[in-house]
Image (cartoon, rainbow, N blue to C red):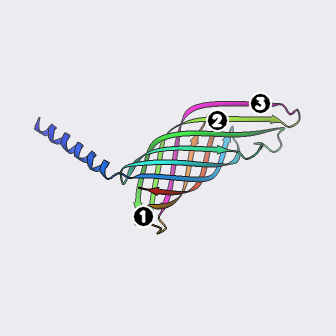
Amino acid sequence: MTNRLLILSLILFTFGVQAKASRHEYSFDAGITQITKQGESKTAFTNRGRYNYYFSPFWALDINYTRMQTTELASFNPNSDTSAKTEYDAFGAGIKLNQPIGKRFNVFAATGLSYSNVSEESENKITKEKSSDKESSFDPYFNAGLMFNPGLGKNVNFSIDYTYQNLGLDYTASYISVGAHLTF
């Protein structure tokens, strides 16, 4: 009984120390997406806002919002008679792992589940017939990158990262982005 009480006390103390040492991190990034459906791809613009709550210097809760939109009606296949516009919003939550490398660099990875809303509008170039499709789904995401501190203060960092995300309507999205991070 005494051993169990001691173990429980140590666990509670450890959690309290980690929670007290936690940090809040806000970030915004923008990048280029390669969105793929049935083997055909097109390029789009993506932006993401993110909040991380650090339980320790090494791991955090990752909450994010991603928005992607093709800039114009762009065909997957230039020889096709159909053009398509695709966009999605995704709200995600997961775990972020962070490993400092020296004083200026951090390698990080995040994974979790996102709720995405995908919409697609297509138009036949010859008949001008339009159609649209929408789907909402829960899908996994994976993100990895490098964050660096340029010496503007310990709370300001910049990053470059890669994200892969499954989406509804048989789409996948792969994107590279650059971002700014503010830590409290």
- Image quadrant assignment for residue 133: top right
Specify the segment rendered in magenta: 127-148
128 relative to 63, above or below: above
Q: Quadrant of the N terminus?
A: top left
Question: Which tag, 1 or 2, sits closer to the chain's start?
Answer: 2
User: Amino acid type of disc 3?
Assistant: Ser
For the image, the number of numbered tags is: 3
Point out residue 151 in the picture as x, y percentages from the top left corner: 46, 69
In the foreground, 57 or 180: 180
Q: Residue at x 64, y 44 (%)?
A: 68
Spatial CA span between label 3 and label 1:
50 Å
Q: Is residue 95 left or right of residue 160?
A: left
Closer to the chain start, of discs 3 and 2, is: 2
Magenta segment includes 1: no
Q: Can you identify the residue that label 3 sits on?
A: 131
Percent x, y of residue 57: 36, 54
Tell me the number on the disc at residue 118.
2
Determine the main secondary structure of the stretch shown in magenta. strand
Do the CB atoms of the residues marked 3 and 1 lie less than 8 Å apart? no
Report the residue marked by disc 1.
Answer: 154
Crowd rating for badge 2 (residues with CA inside 10 Å; few <14, some 14–19, many 20+)? many
The residue at 25%/47% (across/down) is 14
Q: Is residue 10 left or right of residue 112?
A: left
